[in-house]
Every structure is written in structure tokens, then in C-alpha cells.
Image (cartoon, helix red, strand yellow):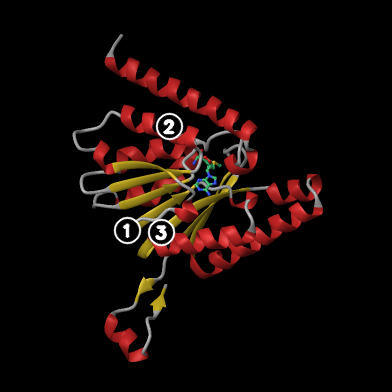
Amino acid sequence: MDTWTTSHERVLARRSAGGWMFLLEAARDLRATGAVAPSSRRLGKLLTDRVREESGRALTVLEAGAGSGAITRVLLPLIGPGSRLDVVDSNPRFVGHLRHLVDAHPAPAGHHERVHVHQARIEHFDVPRRYDAIVSGLPFTNFDPAQVAAIMDRYLELLHPGGTLTYFAYRGTRLARSLLASRSEARRHREVEQVLAAYQRRHAVGRWTVWGNLPPADVWQLRAPAAVPAADSAAEGRLITSR
Ligand SMILES: C[S@@+](CC[C@H](N)C(=O)[O-])C[C@H]1O[C@@H](n2cnc3c(N)ncnc32)[C@H](O)[C@@H]1O
């Protein structure tokens, strides 16, 4: 058997193991896992396009809610010399799987030192660095509105001025909740969407729909405000930010 076939088969085996693991974790805790299947390749590509476009320079990238690594797998080859990828998930079983995934990734010398996997809730993830890009896989509509606002604020804080946050939201979940869940759950869901809409109004620079995902998903891209030069902000007597 040639090397390509064996490594290709290894990738396929790992992907299918990731799929089963995802289903198991969804059965254990659907609210935190947020889906029954990992993101599709098309969704993975759209979520990482921004990193791909900029991958010619040194980048700091954060992936939050990495699960079984569907998006991590797409990000790994984009992390070149001088770049850094922090991968975060709150579920220790996913974190173990992600560490194996990173270790098994065929990479040039030095690549593994650029990728760090952390077990943490993203709202408590305390790091001394800022990021050029954040890719978020968190199931926001399963959270409380206040938690979503806290996470979005934290993301904006963690981004360099002008850095991008890319995240997705499954389509049709509000209708499903309004038909199948309690009134208070349906209200919570609507309130989360209102919180997200406020951030989208202020910061969105792009939105795309991936119909081929299970379930179909909207991808949102938000940009952190760019800092205004110090002289201008001094003239105003305060720090000004602009889009
Ligand atoms: C919908 S899955 C996305 C998985 C993967 N990114 C994908 O696209 O296939 C959401 C992931 O977020 C993780 N998660 C949920 N709440 C979290 C939190 N507060 N902080 C970090 N990770 C969280 C879950 O453990 C799960 O792995």
C-alpha cells in the first residue's frame, strides 16, 4: 500500500471516529454539544476563509468550541511559521480527542509547538495575547442571553483592532423551539437572537448560508473596531474606535 493511501485512510478513519464521538457527546449533553454531527467541509471552509486569506503572514488564531475537530483539521495546515493556534473546548473528552488530532497531524518541524489545546469554558479563558482571527463553534442559542453577551464581549476584547470573529448559527432552530419547546425556552431563544443581532448590527461585515450542512447554517463574520490613531483620540479626550 502506498503512503498516500495509508495516510488518506487514517484521515478518513479519524473523521469517522470524530463523527461517532460527536453523536455520543450529543447524547450525553445536547445543550453544550449543540448538534448531532460535526460541521460539514463546506461550513469548515467558510469559517476559515479569513484565516486562509491571511495565512501568508504570522497570525494568532483562536478556535472556540472545537468539538471533535472538524474545523481544527481545516485550520491546522494554515498555521505557518510565526503563527499560533489556540484550540479551546469545555468538554474534557473532546479535548483528549483534539490533542490526539494535533499530535497525529503530519507537520513540518516546529508546527506542533504552534498549536495549543486548552480545556476551558471560553468565557473564563484568560490569555495574555490578542488574536487576528477567532473562529467560534459555540451553540449560542442553547445558552442564556447574558452568557452570550459575555462571550461576545470577551471575543471582541480578545481580538486585535480590526481582527475578525467568524461564527455560525443553525437555521430553523427558532421555529423548531417555538413548536416543540416550552414557552420560556422559546423566549430565551428569541432573546439570544436579539443579543446576537445587536452585535451583528454594530460589527458584521459578511453573512453566508451553507445549505449543505446538517442542519443548514448561517455563517457570520464580525470585525472588531479598528483603533483610531492616538493623536485623534487625544483630540477627542477619549479613546475612539471606528469600523
Ligand atoms: C456545535 S459543537 C461545534 C463543534 C465543532 N466546532 C464543529 O463545528 O463540528 C459546540 C462545541 O462547543 C463546546 N462548548 C460548549 N460550551 C462551551 C463553552 N462555554 N466554552 C468552550 N466550549 C464550549 C462543546 O463542548 C462542543 O464541542
The residue singled out by tag 2 in the image is 96
Residue 181 percent across, percent down from the top left: 78, 47
- Identify the element where label 1 is drawn: loop
Residue 60 lies, in percent from the top left, at 31, 52
Is residue 146 among what the camera can see?
yes
Question: What's the residue at 46%, 54% (across, down)?
Answer: 124
User: Separation of disc 2 and disc 3 at Cα?
Assistant: 28 Å
149, above or below 44, in the image: below
Q: Secondary structure at mark 3?
A: strand
Q: Which mark is residue 164?
A: 3
Dot 1 beta carbon under 8 Å from ligand 1: no
Left or right: 217, with 135 as reference point: right
In the rendered structure, which disc, 2 or 3, sits on the residue that comes first in sequence?
A: 2
147 sits left or right of 122 in the view: right
239 and 213: which one is in front? Answer: 239
Identify which amino acid the numbered label 3 is placed on. Thr
Q: Badge 1, how many Cα within 10 Å: few under 14, some, many 20+?
A: few
Residue at (70, 59) in percent of width and height: 190
Q: Quadrant of the N terminus?
A: top left
Q: Residue at x 53, y 48 (%)?
A: 138
Point out which mark residue 128 bears. Answer: 1
Q: Position of residue 95 (x, y in %)?
A: 44, 36
Name the amino acid, label 1: Pro
